Amino acid sequence: EQAEQEYQQALKLLKQGNKAEASFILQKVLDKAPNHTAARSLLIEYHLNIKDPDQVAVLLRDGLTIDPTQAIFIKQQALLLHEQGQYK
C-alpha cells in the first residue's frame, strides 16, 4: 500500500535527521490512511517537539475519534494537558 511505503520513507528521513520533511510525508500518510496509528503518533511527537500544541490537539482529537481506546493517544493527550497545566 502506498501509505505504508510513504510511512517507511518518513522513518528513513527521521533517521537522517530530516524531521520537517518527514512530518510532511507523515501528514500525507494520514491523509490517505487516517487510521495509521504509528504515523499519527510520530506526527504528534514531532508537533510536541516543535511546541505546536494546537496541531497536537487536532491530531489527538482525530486519532481518538477513530479509535477511542488507543492507549498511545490517551497517553499523549495526558502529556499535552499536563504541559498546558490543565492536568495535574
Image (cartoon, rainbow, N blue to C red):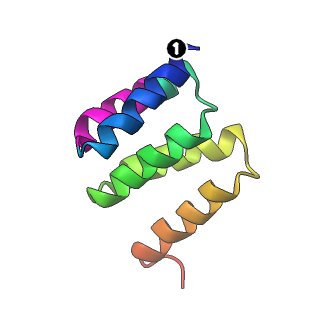
Tell me the SS state at disc 1.
helix
Query: Residue at point 45% right, 47% down?
Result: 42
Between 88 and 5, the one lying in front of the other is 5
Is 74 situated above or below 67?
below
Query: Residue at point 42% right, 44% down?
Result: 43
The percent position of residue 71, horizontal first and vertical second, equals 69, 58
Instruction: Count numbered badges in the picture.
Output: 1
**Can you see residue 86?**
yes
Is 4 situated above or below 40?
above
Range drawn in magenta? 18-28
| Residue 71 on the magenta segment | no
Is 72 situated above or below 64?
below
Residue placed furthest toward the bottom: 88
Q: Is residue 29 left or right of residue 12?
A: right
Q: Is residue 16 left or right of residue 88?
A: left
- For disc 1, the marked residue is 2
The percent position of residue 1, horizontal first and vertical second, equals 59, 14
**Can you see residue 27?**
no
Taken as a whole, is the magenta stretch helix, strand or loop? Answer: helix
| Residue 24 on the magenta segment | yes
- Mark 1 neighbour class, 10 Å CA radius: few under 14, some 14 to 19, many 20 or more: few
Query: Residue at point 46% right, 66% down?
Result: 80
Residue placed furthest toward the right: 69
Between 13 and 29, the one lying in front of the other is 13
Of the residues shown, which amino acid type is indicated by label 1?
Answer: Gln
The percent position of residue 61, horizontal first and vertical second, equals 57, 47
Residue 21 figure quarter: top left
The percent position of residue 48, horizontal first and vertical second, equals 36, 58
Which part of the image, by quadrant, shows the C terminus? bottom right
